[in-house]
């Protein structure tokens, strides 16, 4: 899908489809009013057929004195309630309708709507990301592919200001990154193995001139990553520790480290998971996928930032060599851990990766992980759980999350929770019981990040959708990209 910015009038735009907004009070948006006047009230005449509810649509064809072949009316909901959610829903509804049309190009007269205090750049980024998500398909493993949509080009009718062009470049690259993250998430674990993720990182390195390094099992042994190695011990697939670096800023600038959980399949290990929905544990590498997606996005837009992605990746399998409940391992940090539940494996690979990340002297570290079912219980599928040992960093992440509408909710990380990780036999245990399960998981990681400015994103509820629409969401790529750019001083 091609996007371009161009000053256009809705009645004169020579395009397959002009998209116009209508509020549920039957009030036409400004461009809709213009088209209505030019066409002698054709829009008003059609309004009885449009509820105006957010996301409702109505297609009109061949309007007199209108250059476009079609006019797509999109309901915006009540004008007095119009905000971010309604804008996003309207864009997605428009994209879904456009996907089914025969039009080759369209002009989206929704992007200049006033969405509370948001800027036009914000509108533009949201529109591009929403449309690209609506057009994303994953049918490479089906014999019968879905129909290819006719739509090829979307014009965003805005003034050609430098800031808007930059917003478009950012949004395009972010969508490319999120597409990669979605596809890696959707690929099954027999294809998307740790080796496959390493190959993808190498491919990104070739395509975008990045530095890549892949550590093998023997390297991990030398480094003393006893915790990571414990998780991979029963798997026939070799583990990998992927390090991917993008340097878009001065060499002297300390990087942002992104550490992504890359469990390509989580059976639970000896603490085996129940069979129901276990297939969804192929998404347990979504943190890793989001790191690759975010780096692809930042490199693709040549962002002025330095980023290092650190991805521990392996399977969590049961078997004769598997780590067993009660086993005690020594982490790379030297701290010992009693593994009371082998299904709490994410923290076991992340702790060694976080220790390893210290060597890049990062300015800040953010880990991204489908870490706990408890986070899904706490926050559902809307907000990602945010934890941080530095409130300034937490505030920065929260601001980027609000800006990208890839939202987070901060959870406590008080020392008081550490008590739950007490062990009689090792320095501490890898689980803290049912109460506050996402907090004790974060508290475990906090023991490995004392030397770092660190934030943790628990994306267990937000990385994928279940049910009929099962599939990866590409979150939190928009958040990570926005964070990196804002951190570098971009608006
Ligand atoms: N990958 C899971 C977390 C998860 C579960 C994500 C369900 C999304 C949906 C993680 O490795 C895990 O199994 N966590 C356990 C931790 C428990 C054993 C302390 C959990 O959440 O049940
Ligand atoms: Mn698990
Ligand atoms: Zn897991």
Image: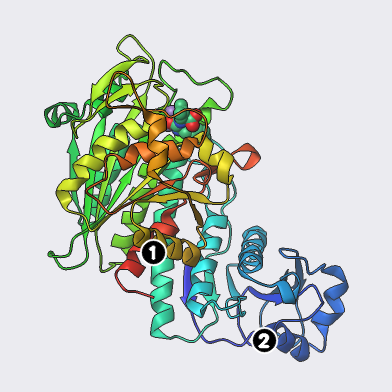
Which residue is nearer to you in this view: 488 or 438? 438
**Mark 2 and mark 1: Cα distance apart in space:** 43 Å
Which residue is nearer to you in this view: 312 or 401? 401
Left or right of 342: which side holds 256? left
Residue 22 visible to the viewer: no
Q: Is disc 1 placed on a helix, strand or loop?
A: helix
Quick check: is the Cβ at mark 2 less than 8 Å away from ligand 1? no
Res 162 quadrant in image: bottom left
Q: Label 1: which residue?
A: 396
Res 154 quadrant in image: bottom right
Q: In the displayed structure, would residue 14 be above or below residue 404?
A: below
Which residue is nearer to you in this view: 314 or 205? 314
Q: Residue at x 44, y 22 (%)?
A: 268
* Percent position of residue 71, x then y: 71, 75
Residue 279 visible to the viewer: yes
Q: Residue at x 58, y 61 (%)?
A: 150
Q: Is disc 2 placed on a helix, strand or loop?
A: loop
Q: In the displayed structure, would residue 227 be above or below residue 115?
A: above
Q: Residue at x 16, y 29 (%)?
A: 224
Q: Label 2: which residue?
A: 11
Left or right of 462: which side holds 269? left
Badge 1 crowding class, 10 Å Cα cut-off, few under 14, some 14 to 19, many 20 or more, is: some
Quadrant assignment for ligand 3: top left
Left or right of 383: which side holds 252? left
Badge 2 crowding class, 10 Å Cα cut-off, few under 14, some 14 to 19, many 20 or more, is: many
Of callouts 2 and 1, the N-terminal one: 2
Nearest-to-viewer mark from 2 and 1 = 1
């Amino acid at each position: 899908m091609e996007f371009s910015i161009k000053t256009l009038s809705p009645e004169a735009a020579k395009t397959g489809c002009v998209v116009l907004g209508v509020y549920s009070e039957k009030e036409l948006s400004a461009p809709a009013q213009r088209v209505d006047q030019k066409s002698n009230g054709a829009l008003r005449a059609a309004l009885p057929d449009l509820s105006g509810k957010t996301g409702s649509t109505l297609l009109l064809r061949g309007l007199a004195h209108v250059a476009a072949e079609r006019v797509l009316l999109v309901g915006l909901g009540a004008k007095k309630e119009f905000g971010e959610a309604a804008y996003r829903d309207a864009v997605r509804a428009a994209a879904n309708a456009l996907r089914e049309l025969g039009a080759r190009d369209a002009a989206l007269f929704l992007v200049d709507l006033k969405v509370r205090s948001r800027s036009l750049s914000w509108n533009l980024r949201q529109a591009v990301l929403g449309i690209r998500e609506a057009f994303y398909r994953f049918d490479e493993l089906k014999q019968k592919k879905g129909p290819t949509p006719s739509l090829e080009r979307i014009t965003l009718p805005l003034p050609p200001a430098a800031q808007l062009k930059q917003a478009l470049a950012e949004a395009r690259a972010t969508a490319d990154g999120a597409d990669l993250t979605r596809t890696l998430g959707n690929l099954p674990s027999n294809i998307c193995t740790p080796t496959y993720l390493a190959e993808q990182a190498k491919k990104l390195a070739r395509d975008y001139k990045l530095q890549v390094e892949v550590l093998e099992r023997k390297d991990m042994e030398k480094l003393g990553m006893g915790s990571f190695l414990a998780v991979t011990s029963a798997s026939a697939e070799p583990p990998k520790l992927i390090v991917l670096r993008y340097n878009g800023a001065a060499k002297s600038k300390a990087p942002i480290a992104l550490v992504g959980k890359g469990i390509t399949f989580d059976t639970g290990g000896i603490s085996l998971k129940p069979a129901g929905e276990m297939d969804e544990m192929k998404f347990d590498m979504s943190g890793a996928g989001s790191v690759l997606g975010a780096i692809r996005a930042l490199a693709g837009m040549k962002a002025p930032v330095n980023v290092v992605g650190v991805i521990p990746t392996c399977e969590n399998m049961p078997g004769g060599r598997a780590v067993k409940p009660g086993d005690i391992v020594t982490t790379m940090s030297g701290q010992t851990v009693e593994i009371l539940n082998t299904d709490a494996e994410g923290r076991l690979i992340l702790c060694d990766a976080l220790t390893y990340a210290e060597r890049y002297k990062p300015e800040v570290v953010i880990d991204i992980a489908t870490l706990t079912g408890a986070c899904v219980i706490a926050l559902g599928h809307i907000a990602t759980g945010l934890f941080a040992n530095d409130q300034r960093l937490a505030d920065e992440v929260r601001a980027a999350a609000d800006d990208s509408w890839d939202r987070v909710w901060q959870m406590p990380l008080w020392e008081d929770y550490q008590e739950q990780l007490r062990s009689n036999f090792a320095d501490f245990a890898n689980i803290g019981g049912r109460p506050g399960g996402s907090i004790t998981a974060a508290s475990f990681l906090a023991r490995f990040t004392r030397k770092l400015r660190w934030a943790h994103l628990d994306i267990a509820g937000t990385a994928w959708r279940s049910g009929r629409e099962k599939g990866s969401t590409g979150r939190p790529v928009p958040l990570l990209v926005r964070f990196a750019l804002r951190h570098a001083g971009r608006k």
